[in-house]
Image: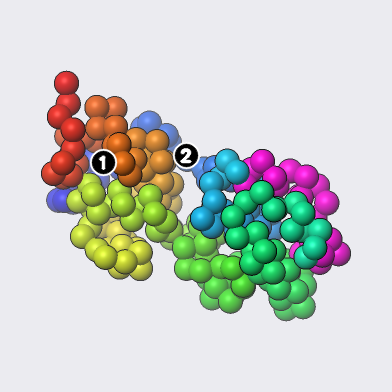
Amino acid sequence: MQKKSVDEMFSRFSKREPKPRIELHYSNNFTLFVAVVLSAQSTDKGVNKITPDLFHEADNPFKMLLLGETRLKEHIKSIGLYNSKAKNIIKACEIMVNKHNNQLPDNFDDLCALPGVGRKSANVLMNSLFGHHTIAVDTHVFRVSNRMGLCKTKTPDATEKALHKKIPAKWKNYAHHWLVLHGRYVCKARNPMCSDCIVADICEFKNRRVLP
């Protein structure tokens, strides 16, 4: 996709949703960290159902340690991989209490050092909490970017690098949010809603459905 088309694409996204936000519910930096860890291979909707009661009891690392792994599991047992997620959250809380003054670290390397946090999750946190122009590549971003012609890559890491080169700096603060929303609600995996797509005339998807 040519740079002019890329710029037009994100211009349209910005007019439709000027300041998109992550759809996970949270009240502070730590609660977003927990929600992001829980959301791995789970839906935001499913995570949002269980976190209000959890965050009422434990909204910082120290309180989460007091809650303990067993009680944490009771709160999150309705979502996938809850056993491993509980272990990772507790281990991460120990690190935050012992090394970061009971706070979520605010730099990429320290975030990646926390159990349960990979590159994608760290990018989400750096963008949503600290305003860095990171691009978090989840399944939606990977699929949409390659389908629409923003890039031609085979891995999330390669996609991230390609998007950083392709997307103009002025759009990067919200770029991955727009791509996530587009992939979640319009450019779906199995049944892309091309007739409802605001960038269908720009999209380079060869198998897109013919507009009426």
Residue 64 colored magenta?
yes
Q: Is 211 in front, or is 81?
A: 81
Question: Could you give the CA–CA distance between mark 2 and mark 1, rounded to whole angstroms?
Answer: 15 Å
Residue 141 colored magenta?
no
In percent of the image, x 22 and y 57: which residue is there? 151
Q: Position of residue 10 (x, y in %)?
A: 30, 42
Question: Which of the 4 quarters of the picture holds residue 69?
Answer: bottom right
Name which residue type carries label 2: Lys
- Eyeballing the image, is 156 above or below 201? below
Q: Which residue is mark 1?
A: 9
Q: Position of residue 73 (x, y in %)?
A: 74, 58
User: Is 157 situated left or right of 72 in this image?
Assistant: left
Q: Range of the magenta residues?
A: 47-68
Residue density around tag 1, few if under 14, some if 14–19, many if 20 or more, within 10 Å: some
Q: Is 102 in front, or is 116?
A: 116
User: Is 176 situated left or right of 24 in this image?
Assistant: left
Local SS, label 1: helix
The C terminus, quarter of image: top left
Q: Residue lying furthest top in this view?
A: 212
Q: Position of residue 96 (x, y in %)?
A: 72, 72
- Eyeballing the image, is 42 above or below 81? above
Q: Which residue is mark 2?
A: 19
Is residue 103 visible in the rendered image? The answer is: yes
Q: Is 181 in front, or is 139?
A: 139
Name which residue type carries label 1: Met
Q: Position of residue 55 (x, y in %)?
A: 76, 50
In percent of the image, x 29 and y 32: which residue is there? 193
